[in-house]
Amino acid sequence: MIGVRESSPFAMDVGARYTADIFLVPEDPLGELPEAELNLRRFCFYRNRAVIVRVGEKERQLLLFPDVALTFLELRDAPRQLQWNNRVSLIFPESACRLSFRPENGTVECRLEEFGARLDSATCQANLVETTAALNRLVDEVLAGAVDSGYLTAEQAEQLA
């Protein structure tokens, strides 16, 4: 399981296996996705797990597929954008929520917003270094899992990192 120290107000932890059969296998009938991205989506689908996001006292469950798989490139780029003091917004439409970050003076305002029929939000202030580390660990764990299980080669994972 990954995530920042338990005392940190922001965390993204890979959790238990998710086995509900409610999603379609990722395909690319038009051949628009690079092979590595399609294989990463397949890894997230076939090895699906919960991803628990904690913002302050609020926890929200996302999934590797479709949530992380469909926003992987934005998720991967988020730590670098935060280090450059750029705001980041990650939208997870299947789970009807948005995770946004606003860096300022070595801290980050983290906000988790639910939309749709359930309107709710939570905000916390977190350390910039710990927040970017949590995001990087999630990306690294997903890529390592895809390589270990044969969905990606080490070279493909390096391209996606």
Image: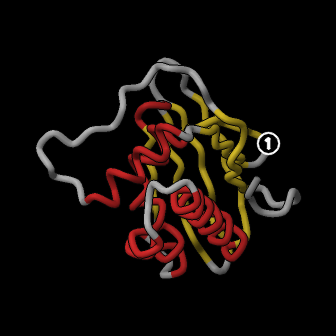
Tell me where residue 24 sits by quadrant. top left
**Image location (x, y in percent) of residue 71:** 41, 51
Q: Taking 134 as reference, is 97 left or right?
A: left
Q: Taking 103 as reference, is 159 left or right?
A: left
Q: Which residue is mark 1?
A: 57
**Image location (x, y in percent) of residue 96:** 47, 31
The front one of 10 and 28 is 28
Q: Residue at x 74, y 58 (%)?
A: 3
Q: Secondary structure at mark 1?
A: loop
Give the residue type that dot 1 points to: Glu
The vertical placement of 37 against 26, above or below, is below
Count neighbours of disc 1 (C-alpha within 10 A) and say few if under 14, some if 14 to 19, many if 20 or more.
Answer: few
Q: Residue at x 14, y 49 (%)?
A: 31
**Image location (x, y in percent) of residue 146:** 52, 56
Q: Taking 37 as reference, is 60 left or right?
A: right
Number of numbered discs: 1
Residue at the far right in the pictured view: 7
Q: Residue at x 44, y 61 (%)?
A: 152
